[in-house]
Image (tube, grey):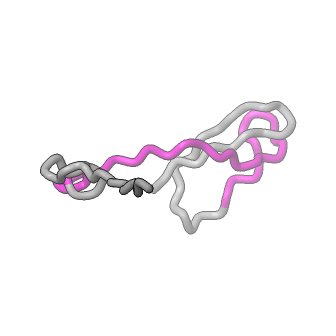
């Protein structure tokens, strides 16, 4: 279950709630009784297991560098 952050439009205090995604959002500020608004925040992502770095984003060191050759014509 995720944490949701709300901010009161009247007093400006922030409140965090541990809710199910299917739960109704909070509407009333517990401090002053004003209207709450859901605040977007950063999400932490953790990749666990093997293979994320070595197969997805690591460049191969065994590949030879590509070189382009241009031919010049002499007249």
Q: In which image quadrant can residue 75 be found?
A: bottom left
Q: Residue at x 60, y 43 (%)?
A: 41
Of residue 58 and residue 53, the one placed in the foreground of this image is 58
Q: In which image quadrant can residue 34 be found?
A: top right
Q: Residue at x 75, y 53 (%)?
A: 27
Q: Residue at x 78, y 39 (%)?
A: 8
Of residue 7 and residue 55, the one placed in the foreground of this image is 55
Q: Is residue 69 left or right of residue 73?
A: left
Residue 70 against residue 39 in the figure, above or below? below
Question: Of all residues shown, which one is farthest toward the front?
Answer: 75
Residue 29 against residue 52 in the figure, above or below? above
Image x and y of residue 9, in percent? 84, 40
For the record, the magenta segment spans 25-54
Q: How many marks?
A: 0
Q: Main secondary structure of the magenta part?
A: loop
Question: Of all residues shown, which one is farthest toward the left?
Answer: 62
Q: Is residue 17 left or right of residue 31?
A: left
Q: Is residue 51 left or right of residue 69?
A: left
Image x and y of residue 72, in percent? 40, 54
Q: Residue at x 19, y 56 (%)?
A: 51
Q: Is residue 43 magenta?
A: yes
Of residue 53 and residue 70, the one placed in the foreground of this image is 70
Question: Of all residues shown, which one is farthest toward the right?
Answer: 10
Residue 69 against residue 6 in the figure, above or below? below
Image x and y of residue 29, in percent? 75, 42
Image x and y of residue 18, in percent? 51, 49
Q: Is residue 52 magenta?
A: yes
Q: Is residue 26 left or right of residue 66?
A: right
């Amino acid at each position: 279950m995720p944490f949701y952050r709300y901010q009161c439009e009247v007093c400006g205090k922030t409140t965090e709630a541990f809710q199910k995604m299917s739960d109704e959002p909070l509407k009333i500020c517990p401090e002053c009784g004003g209207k709450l608004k859901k605040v977007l925040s950063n999400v932490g992502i953790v990749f666990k297991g093997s293979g994320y770095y070595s197969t997805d984003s690591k460049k191969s060191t065994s590949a030879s560098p590509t070189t382009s050759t241009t031919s010049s014509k002499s007249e």
